[in-house]
Every structure is written in C-alpha cells, then in structure tokens.
Image (cartoon, grey):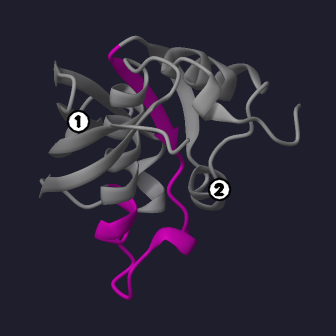
C-alpha cells in the first residue's frame, strides 16, 4: 500500500476504488471507527461497520455521532466518486433521521450513499443504514459544496 497518495490528482472514482483495493490509504476516520468500504461505483458508495462497545453512549446504544459519521462518509464519498481530478467537496449540511437503536448485538450495519444531484458547484446525496436483516436504522441527506483544489 502506498504511504502517501495525493488524491486531488485522481478522479474521485479512482480514489474510492483505491480505498477498496488498498492502493489508496483509507481516511483516518474510517480506520478509527472501524468502517470498511464495501463497494464504489460512480454516484454510489457502500460501507459497513460492526458495532462494538467502544461505539456506545452511556446507555449502551451506538452514539448518534457514529451513525452520522457513517452516513456523512457514504454520502460524501458518493459525491467524491463523481468528481474529476482537481475537484474536491465539503459537506455544507447534513440531516439525519434516527429510526432505531444499534447495539453490538445488532451485528454488521451497512450504509449506502447515493448522489441525487451532481452539479458544478453543489451536489445533493442521500443515504440509508440497514442491519443484516434489511431493517432500516437511519436515513440522511446532505448538500455538498464542490470546489477546485488549491493550486
């Protein structure tokens, strides 16, 4: 695996596929939280996470911020997958709907982000998190700002 890769020189889909095959180091947040890339296509990215006690709030349920990070990650990566080299994005806003709690006994959860609109200056994406049985855990939407990399 490469130690450093300037992802701004690659098309977004190449970055996402690099996360999958190990040729591009994953973002630190994914590694820290235990998120894994499952698939990456132009406009759609899927990640999974095995909930553990280290993800829990004081009540023993996965902290909402962990789910929000998972949702933000798949939505942002789905937007990134549509960008040419030299273009980057940042999240402008995120809206999350929590539908059920997650505990270690929930088992693997899977999140898929999908681009709804990819424009020159902004993009909109949505995401869903489900458990292994397909039960919906949370949904989200985001607006991202698209910009040129700094020269």
Which is more foreground, mark 1 or mark 2? 2
Residue drawn 32% across the image and 16% down it: 43
Mark count? 2
Answer with the quarter of the image where residue 15 lies: top right
Q: Is residue 87 toward the left or the right of residue 93 in the image?
A: right
Q: Earlier in the sequence, mark 1 or mark 2?
A: 2
Image mark for residue 28: 2
Q: Residue 53, how many percent across, how many down?
A: 54, 72
Position of 111 with respect to 21 (left or right) is left
Q: Is residue 132 visible?
A: yes
Q: 54 or 84: nearer the eye?
A: 84
Q: Which residues are magenta?
A: 43-67
Residue drawn at x 54%, y 24% is: 38
- Where's the N terminus, which quadrant? top right
Q: Is residue 119 above or below residue 66?
A: above
How far apart are labels 1 and 2 at the CA level? 22 Å
Please identify the quadrant where the C terminus is shown: top right
Q: Is residue 6 left or right of residue 91?
A: right
Furthest-bottom residue in view?
58
- Determine whether 20 is above or below 5 in the image: above
Task: In the rendered structure, find residue 108 and report the number of the disc placed on it.
Answer: none
Say which residue appears at 51% left-offset and 16% top-offset.
13
**Residue 137 visible to the viewer:** no
The answer to whether residue 53 is magenta is yes
Q: Which residue is mark 1?
A: 128
In this picture, residue 39 sits left or right of residue 140: right
Q: Secondary structure at mark 2?
A: helix
Estimate the x, y position of residue 74 in percent, counting from the top left.
Answer: 38, 37
> Crowding near pointer 2: few (<14 within 10 Å), some, many (20+)?
few
């Amino acid at each position: 695996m490469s130690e450093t890769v300037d992802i701004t020189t690659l098309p977004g889909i190449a970055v996402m596929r690099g996360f999958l095959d190990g040729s591009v180091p994953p973002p630190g947040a994914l590694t820290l939280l235990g998120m894994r890339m499952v698939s990456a296509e132009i406009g759609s990215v899927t990640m999974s996470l095995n909930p553990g006690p280290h993800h829990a709030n004081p009540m023993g349920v996965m902290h909402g911020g962990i789910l929000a990070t998972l949702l933000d990650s798949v939505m942002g990566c789905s937007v990134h997958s549509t960008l040419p080299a030299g273009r980057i994005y940042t999240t402008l806003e995120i809206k999350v709907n929590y539908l059920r709690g997650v505990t270690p006994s929930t088992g693997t959860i899977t999140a898929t982000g999908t681009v709804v609109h990819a424009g020159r200056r902004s993009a909109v994406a949505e995401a869903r998190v489900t458990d292994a049985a397909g039960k919906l855990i949370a949904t989200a939407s985001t607006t991202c700002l698209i910009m040129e990399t700094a020269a």
